[in-house]
């Protein structure tokens, strides 16, 4: 790809049309500039040429043989024919061979109607077959893993899936096995095909060989209604198509030209976690708790009860939490309505993340792949911002950037890309390549002191791009909209600070909080101190929760309001790089007709409170205006975002770290039955050294104790990339919440049970 | 023209696997002389001037191949291709087993000539005995200070790595060989880039055949003019021809290029009594047949090509009038279909299709339309693939279809409905 205009231009003639392109442009790309389609199967713009499918044959004057357009760079004066008799005969010949063994099951094939083989056979094929012998018979539904099914008969061996796993993810699970006509796609090890990006291979597959389990036999492409929107499952904001039919989401697809945000990929969470919209457990009516039992009430009653509770309480004893899962407009209105009602206790930070905007050092996602070194601080972005992690892998494996991880830990073994693990920020700075001019800092946004130290340590003179991966999709938008005790919209200072989430919880536990309104958040599961939030919710007389499902937080509420999900509303969202992206409702979704968006709820509340509302034009202008005012004066770990937590206690035991997993969560994941197979098991990951010292082995079951708190039956994982003296738990598992031991817990391993003994039913265990 | 003994000298007379014997006969003198007296460029110049062409099959001028390497100090590798697998070729594994030190000395000279400090030899998996013999020879050479650091005190380091393949024909293709050598799936790479620019482990690499490298030793000893003085205008020097099939004394025979087809048959003991020559496949399984009218054709690259075939690796298969050409065609097509790596669709699907049809012919179940189809499909596979394997199917099949159509027609079934396992599948 040309990166600047100084690249020499050449003129090539394609089918009589002159095309001016940068030197080195491949013919297949040059042809696109004149809307001339050269058919391809193996070539992909994001992966480059492979030269295998042989369908892109063109005639080039002066060359005796047909050439493949995917691997032939345009040179000045080159004359290319894509429609000459010779080129057409070459394509026909190749297509005939594709159909020798390809089954003609188009009527029952999911790809039918959007299949490159079908389309090219129509456009360039010969119509009748000369093959007299029966076609090869192969397995039609090979279970490749939890997400993908392979039809071996349909596979045309273009190897796009294999190359995706090699070039794009670096995981290298899929390989081509055997040879010749017996070629099959399989995992190298024979284990299930499972990583965070498997669904992309179904889009790369030019035929119906690789299909998603969630979409098999669900629809014909021409029956789908398509809407383009932004994924809000994490803060990357990948652009995607949402395809619906019969009132339900049938599938989601990436955008071919989303270079700036997703680089045209989707993670499996964003792609597949869409089954919850039609889950029968969705809350469909406002629920009011009376005598410990929820009863259905109407919206008018709900607004009246809610407003009454707020009116009757002192503003200082009212708080609102959440915003990271709302749109920018909703987040703005949230703080607007509550502030107008005199409430100052506002905080979007319902989980571990403390800061969302990297302020003056923020960089674009495209800039991330242009750096010379990437320093990851805190939790790896692999599970928090998966598609951004692909960009890091691209920078490392294809552009030679150096990846340095400071005390990083991951829930899975790291992918095949090279990385340097160091223990401290100083070591990371020492490990920067000497030629480095541009450095990216990628921080999880959790430990303010750590973020600040990292940014301060970068030597002067290096251009620094900073990224905060965060937890909820619109954390940065909620922060910029002022759902924060210390800022108003656009990071404007407020006359008097409110209580942040820690303060609100402390107040609630001491009985000083009367009303808590929680929007699109599940702090009971994600707030670091589980016992504290549980007590706070219990001691607050009136807790309102807007939710799709009866989460751990909703169960503790007084009033539960059925909310719309991201595919059911319109608005905008802000991604971690500060891009403001559209959120559009999918077409004709059914199942939650009586749910309201948080915007509609806030309007209802404002009316019940008698608070003035901005007009929709005023709202739009306010959102855009305030988003434009970035947090220019802030940096990582700025004091304005709160007080850094006290350093970890040095009492003996294992410090508990919490690790995200894209397939863990109490809301949309827990209520998508199709993805149950992907949910991680509760595990306790420890270092090799600690395992040895404690006498535990991989596969053992243990309990974790901290004071009088305990977590039972955790599966032991022993991993080289876990720091000594720590135990890493997967956060967000509703049945085994990692916050059960409290914030910054120090735990001891007890009740070790050998894996084999456990399997044979002998759980009587040996003490550690 | 007589048989000569250049590379084959001493085979069967002395135990050339013993380094002492090999050195007594002048072995490793050329390598020592090259290191002490010649610059790498001098060796390359000798190689170029001798007119030596690649003996693995393509016949590309070796000196020219070396010249494609970048003219800088970047690390580079020499790889000796000992994956000899072309049907009918058996010269390289004879050299490996009978005169391993000559093979090694050729590799050392080649590596020195291109300025490489690391030479690799990729030995076909089936050559277990040859591999063991070569390893012994390498160990002897290492102990004698011929491989390793600071050779002969000149400061030149040269390491040799031996790699065994796993028996895939495609790994004889140089880029598939490099992939396999790197531990990857043995399948040809997309070119460009060519190995001279980005080969083994991404570094500039020359891949030369065993026989090619071995000829460097006598060329250094006797001079480029000596080698260039025999053969023809453009096919210079000597060649080991592996004669097999319907001759009385099949085997490897070393001779000057330009020896006639008739002479080669005679060298190998001639046909069996009372038999008539039907065809000769002159350059391995990938080559088209020569016939009676080509008996006086000189066996050199240009003449054989002009006659519509190729000299290839020098596998010379003689077929008399007992040959069933339908079975022969089936056998070869099955081989290529089986050995296709499957990357490219024309080769993968086309080879399998032709195999299926020919298998029917073997059982007397040919269809009348198949004859035309065999011609056309084998032709339409050709020239469309990433490597030359798919192009190897057409030459033999087309030449015998043209020459012996009656053998195929005799296998066409009278009742077509009985020929197929199932009904035809409309597209």
Image (cartoon, coloured by chain):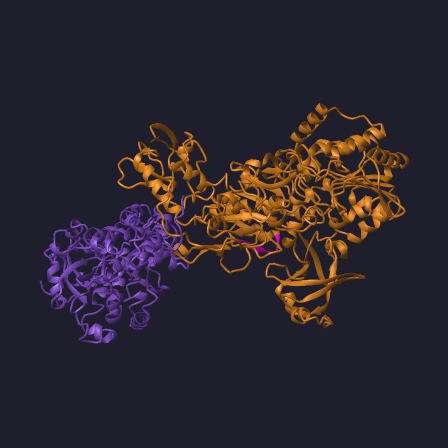
Chain colours: A orange, B purple
Q: Residue at x 31, y 53 (%)?
A: B415
| Number of numbered discs | 0
Residues rendered magenta in the picture: A418-424
Residue A75 figure quarter: top left
Is residue B133 found left or right of A173 in the rendered image?
left
Q: Quadrant of the C terminus of chain B?
A: top left
The correct choice, above or below, for A30 with respect to B294 in the image is above
Q: Position of residue A229 (x, y in %)?
A: 61, 35
* In magenta segment, residue A574: no
| Closer to the camera in the image, A243 or A355 | A243
Can residue A632 be seen from the camera position used here? no
Q: Position of residue B338 (x, y in %)?
A: 35, 58
* In magenta segment, residue A420: yes
The correct choice, above or below, for A12 with respect to B411 in the image is above
Q: Residue furthest front?
A: B415
Q: Quadrant of the N terminus of chain B?
A: bottom left
Residue A702 figure quarter: bottom right
| Closer to the camera in the image, A138 or B342 | A138
Q: Residue at x 76, y 63 (%)?
A: A705
Q: Position of residue A435 (x, y in %)?
A: 48, 46
Residue B257 figure quarter: bottom left
Q: Position of residue A252 (x, y in %)?
A: 59, 41
Can residue B13 be seen from the camera position used here? yes
The correct choice, above or below, for B173 with respect to A753 in the image is above
| Closer to the camera in the image, A483 or A219 | A219
| Closer to the camera in the image, A164 or A746 | A164
């Amino acid at each position: 790809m040309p990166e600047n205009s100084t690249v020499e231009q050449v003129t090539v003639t394609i089918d009589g049309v002159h095309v001016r392109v940068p030197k080195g442009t491949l013919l297949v790309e040059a042809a696109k500039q004149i809307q001339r389609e050269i058919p391809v199967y193996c070539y992909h713009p994001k992966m480059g040429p492979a030269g295998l499918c042989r369908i892109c044959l063109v005639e080039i004057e002066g060359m005796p043989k047909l050439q493949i357009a995917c691997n032939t760079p345009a040179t000045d004066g080159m004359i290319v024919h894509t429609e000459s008799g010779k080129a057409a005969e070459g394509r026909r010949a190749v297509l005939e061979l594709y159909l020798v063994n390809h089954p003609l099951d188009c009527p029952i094939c999911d790809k039918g109607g959007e299949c490159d083989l079908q389309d090219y056979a129509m456009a360039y094929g010969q119509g009748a077959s000369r093959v007299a012998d029966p076609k090869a018979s192969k397995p039609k539904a090979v279970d490749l893993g939890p997400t993908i099914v392979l039809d071996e008969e349909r596979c045309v061996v273009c190897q796009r899936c294999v190359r995706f796993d090699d070039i794009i993810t670096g995981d290298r699970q899929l390989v081509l096995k055997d040879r010749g006509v017996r070629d099959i796609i399989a995992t190298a090890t024979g284990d299930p095909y499972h990583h965070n990006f498997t669904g992309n291979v179904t889009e790369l597959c030019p035929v119906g060989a690789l299909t998603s389990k969630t979409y098999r036999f669900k629809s014909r492409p021409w029956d789908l209604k398509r809407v383009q929107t932004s994924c809000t499952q994490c803060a990357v904001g990948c652009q995607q198509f949402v395809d619906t039919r019969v009132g339900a989401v049938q599938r989601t697809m990436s955008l071919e030209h989303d270079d700036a945000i997703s680089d045209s990929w989707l993670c499996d969470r964003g792609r597949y976690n869409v089954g919850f919209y039609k889950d029968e457990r969705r809350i469909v009516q406002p629920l009011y708790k009376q005598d410990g039992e929820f009863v259905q009430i109407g919206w008018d009653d709900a607004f009246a009860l809610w407003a009454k509770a707020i009116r009757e309480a002192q503003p200082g004893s009212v708080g609102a939490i959440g915003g990271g899962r709302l749109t920018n407009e909703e987040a703005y209105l949230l703080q607007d309505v509550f502030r107008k009602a005199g409430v100052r206790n506002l905080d979007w930070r319902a989980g571990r993340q403390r800061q969302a905007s990297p302020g003056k050092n923020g960089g674009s996602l495209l800039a991330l792949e242009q750096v010379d070194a990437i320093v990851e601080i805190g939790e790896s972005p692999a599970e928090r911002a998966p598609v951004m992690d692909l960009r890091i892998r691209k920078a490392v494996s294809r552009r030679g950037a150096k990846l340095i991880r400071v005390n990083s830990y991951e829930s899975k073994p790291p992918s095949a890309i090279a990385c340097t693990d160091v223990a401290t920020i100083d070591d990371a700075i020492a490990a920067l390549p000497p030629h480095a001019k541009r450095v990216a800092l990628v921080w999880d946004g959790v430990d303010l002191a750590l973020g600040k130290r990292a940014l301060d340590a970068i030597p002067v003179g290096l251009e620094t791009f900073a990224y905060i991966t965060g937890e909820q999709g619109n954390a940065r938008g909620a922060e910029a909209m002022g759902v924060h005790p210390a800022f108003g919209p656009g990071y404007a200072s407020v006359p008097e600070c409110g209580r942040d989430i820690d303060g609100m919880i402390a107040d609630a536990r001491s009985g000083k909080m009367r009303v808590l309104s929680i929007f699109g958040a599940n702090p009971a599961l994600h707030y670091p101190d589980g016992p504290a939030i549980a007590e706070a919710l219990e001691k607050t007389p009136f807790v309102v929760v807007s939710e799709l499902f009866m989460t751990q937080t909703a169960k503790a509420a007084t009033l539960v309001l059925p909310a719309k999900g991201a595919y059911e509303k319109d608005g905008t969202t802000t991604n971690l790089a500060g891009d403001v992206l559209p959120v559009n409702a999918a077409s004709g979704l059914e199942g939650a007709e009586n749910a309201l968006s948080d915007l509609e709820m806030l309007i209802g509340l404002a009316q019940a409170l008698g608070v003035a509302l901005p007009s929709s034009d005023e709202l739009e202008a306010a959102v855009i205006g305030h988003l434009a005012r970035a947090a220019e004066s802030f940096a990582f770990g700025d004091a304005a975002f709160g007080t850094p937590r006290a350093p970890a206690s040095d009492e003996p035991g294992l410090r508990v770290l919490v690790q995200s997993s894209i397939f863990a969560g109490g809301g949309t994941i827990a209520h998508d039955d199709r993805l149950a197979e992907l949910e991680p098991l509760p595990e306790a990951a420890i270092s090799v050294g600690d395992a040895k010292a404690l006498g535990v082995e991989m596969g053992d079951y243990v309990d974790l104790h901290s004071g009088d708190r305990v977590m039972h039956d955790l599966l032991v994982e022993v991993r080289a990339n876990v720091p000594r003296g720590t135990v890493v738990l997967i956060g967000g598992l509703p049945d085994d919440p990692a916050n059960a031991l409290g914030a910054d817990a120090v735990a001891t391993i007890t009740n070790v049970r050998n894996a084999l003994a456990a399997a044979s039913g002998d759980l009587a265990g040996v003490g550690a | 023209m007589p048989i000569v003994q250049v590379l084959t000298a001493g085979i069967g007379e002395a135990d050339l696997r013993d380094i002492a014997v090999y050195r007594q006969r002048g072995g490793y003198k050329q390598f020592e002389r090259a290191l002490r007296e010649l610059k790498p460029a001098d060796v390359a110049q000798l190689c170029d001037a001798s007119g030596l062409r690649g003996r693995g099959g393509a016949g590309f001028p070796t000196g020219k191949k070396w010249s494609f390497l970048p003219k800088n100090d970047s690390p580079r590798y020499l790889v000796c291709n000992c994956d000899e697998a072309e049907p009918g070729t058996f010269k390289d594994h004879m050299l490996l087993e009978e005169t391993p030190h000559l093979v090694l000395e050729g590799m050392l000279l080649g590596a020195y000539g291109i300025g490489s400090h690391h030479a690799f030899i990729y030995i076909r998996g089936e050559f277990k005995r040859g591999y063991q013999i070569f390893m012994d020879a390498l160990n002897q050479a290492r102990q004698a200070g011929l491989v390793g650091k600071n050779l002969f005190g000149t400061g030149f380091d040269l390491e040799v790595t031996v790699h065994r393949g796993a028996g895939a024909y495609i790994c004889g293709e140089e880029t598939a060989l490099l992939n396999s050598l790197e531990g990857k799936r043995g399948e040809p790479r997309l070119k460009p880039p060519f190995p001279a620019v980005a080969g083994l482990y991404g570094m500039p690499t020359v891949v030369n055949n065993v026989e090619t490298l071995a000829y460097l030793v006598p060329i250094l000893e006797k001079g480029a003019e000596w080698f260039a003085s025999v053969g023809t205008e453009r096919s210079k020097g000597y060649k080991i021809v592996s004669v097999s099939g319907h001759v009385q004394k099949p085997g490897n025979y070393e001779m000057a290029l330009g020896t006639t087809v008739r002479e080669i048959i005679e060298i190998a003991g001639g046909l069996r009594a009372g038999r008539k020559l039907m065809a000769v496949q002159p350059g391995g399984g990938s080559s088209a047949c020569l016939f009676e009218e080509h008996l006086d054709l000189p066996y050199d690259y240009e003449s054989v090509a002009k006659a519509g075939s190729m000299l290839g690796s020098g596998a010379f298969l003689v077929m008399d009038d007992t040959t069933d050409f339908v079975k022969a065609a089936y056998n070869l097509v099955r081989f290529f279909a089986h050995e296709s790596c499957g990357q490219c669709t024309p080769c993968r699907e086309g080879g399998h299709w032709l195999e299926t049809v020919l298998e029917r012919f073997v059982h007397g179940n040919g269809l009348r339309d198949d004859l035309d189809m065999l011609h056309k499909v084998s032709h339409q596979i050709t020239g469309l693939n990433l490597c030359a394997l798919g192009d190897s199917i057409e030459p033999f099949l087309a030449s015998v279809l043209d020459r012996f159509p009656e053998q195929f027609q005799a296998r066409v079934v009278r009742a077509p409905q009985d020929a197929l396992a199932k009904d035809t599948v409309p597209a």
